[in-house]
Structures are given as structure tokens and as C-alpha cells.
Amino acid sequence: MSEDVKKFLYVNRKAPYGTIYALEALEVVLIGAAFDQDVSLAFLDDGVFQLTSGQDTAAIGVKNFSPTFRALGDYEVTRLYVERESLEERGLSAEDLQEITYEDEDDDWAEKPSIRVVSREEMAAIMAEQDVILSF
Amino acid sequence: MEYKVNGHTIPADEEGYIINLSDWSKELAEEIAKSENIEMTDEHWEVVNFLRDYYEEYQIAPAVRVLIKAIKKSMGPEKGNNKYLYELFPYGPAKQACKIAGLPKPTGCV
């Protein structure tokens, strides 16, 4: 990577439906992924609900965009940090989240998990090392 | 814009992308292709069907470089490359093939 590569972190704090934030954030990530930057995503507060498995939006008449998170690996976005405390405060755990994987180019295309559950303290450290943080 | 297929009128936006994804049919695809000056061959269908499967699975139309990579992986490098796909769809494989496949314009495509 060249010296021009910056570390971008997209912070998702809102529930997937009810506002447009979550979907818009994901679209920005997909567009931004074309610019060869170092992109990762963070999910905290109600944002952790965006990654839960088995979402069904039929009754609220909006598109269930949760499958799109599984395409992020194709866009070379391979790190989705989820805050453990936010999960626990909502009675959730890693098992409630959908499986999202990427293929590691440097490891013979082995499939690896993209979701990394981290503590609040680790999340703070991850944020501290970013060049750009976009909060949704 | 709109397309006419078997006496039905299918609404589309000003660039020719259909409004209701459920309006899509093979006949409509042929009709959209005609308006793009493309004659559909098995090779065209292969890409269009691939895009429809991708959308079904991930709910997005992939960006062109992602499409090329995904085709390379599933159909091999002789099809998963710029040259092959631009020969089939001269105005851009993602843009044109998505239109024919009845999908929205790829995210990030202007």
C-alpha cells in the first residue's frame, strides 16, 4: 500500500431500521471501498442490531439489507468490530450475529470471519489509531 | 421511460432501469437489451444471470471491479476480465448488464 492510504473507520450506532442511517452508512462504505483505503467498521450501542441474524422486514415494508454485509469481503472490507458491552447490554452475544466471512488473499484464500467482538477498551484503542472516523 | 412487453407497459427511470424489480422477465430483458443495441447471446445471459444471483444473495448490484473478481472466481479468468466483459457490454458491464438484469444501478455508479 502507498503512503496515501488512510485508515477509515465507519462507526454504526443506530438500529438498522426506523432511520436511514444504517443503510446510508453501508452504501457509503461500498462506494468508499473503491478508493483503496484501509476501511473497517465499528458497531456499538443499537448499531449491534444491524448484524443480527434472521432479520425479517416483511411487516415493516422496507428492504432487508442485512445480506449486503456478507458482500463486504468482495469489497475488501474485512474487519467488522463489534463492541462486547453493547451486545451484553442488549441481551445479545456473538451467537446472535450473522456469519460474515472474507477470503484471505495472503493465506491461500482461506475463509476467515470478518466479525471481531472487542471490549469497550479495545474499541477505544481501535478508534485512537484511525485517520478518519465517520459516525452514523 | 417505459418498455412494452407482450402488451404490458413496464415503467423505468429516465436512464432505463426498471422501477419494480418484480416486473422483470426474460422477454423484458431482451427488450431492454434491444434498446441498448445489444443482441443477447448465451454469453450475455451468463453474465445477466450471474448478476441476478448476486443480487438475490447480497441484495446489491456489485461494483464493476467486484463483478469482474466474482466472475473470475466462478467462471475463470478467460471470462473474469475487463476485455471480455466490455466486449459483451460496451457501455460498462455493471451498468448495462444490471439494466438488462432488471437490477438497480450499481451502488457508487454515476
Image (tube, coloured by chain):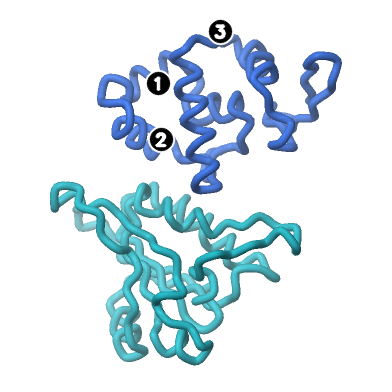
- Assign a secondary structure to mark 2: helix
Q: Which chain is cyan?
A: A
Residue kind at label 1, given as amino acid type: Leu
Circle on res. B67 = 2
* C-beta proximity under 8 Å, tags 1 and 2: yes
Above or below — where is A51 with respect to A70?
below
Please give the name of the residue rendered at 39% of the width and 52% of the height, measured from the top-left corner.
A33
| Sequence-first disc among 1 and 2 | 2
Chain identity of mark 2:
B
Chain identity of mark 1:
B
Where is residue A6? Give x, y as percent. 30, 63
| Sequence-first disc among 3 and 1 | 3
Crowd around label 3: few <14 · some 14–19 · many ≥20 (10 Å): few
Are tags 3 and 1 found on a single chain? yes
Q: CA distance from mark 1 to mark 2?
A: 10 Å
Residue kind at label 2, given as amino acid type: Leu
Where is residue A45? Give x, y as percent. 52, 84
| Sequence-first disc among 3 and 2 | 3
Above or below — where is A110 with respect to A10?
above
- Assign a secondary structure to mark 1: helix
Circle on res. B85 = 1
Q: Dividing the image into 4 quarters, which one contains the N terminus of chain B? A: top right
Front residue of this view, candidates A5 and A124: A124
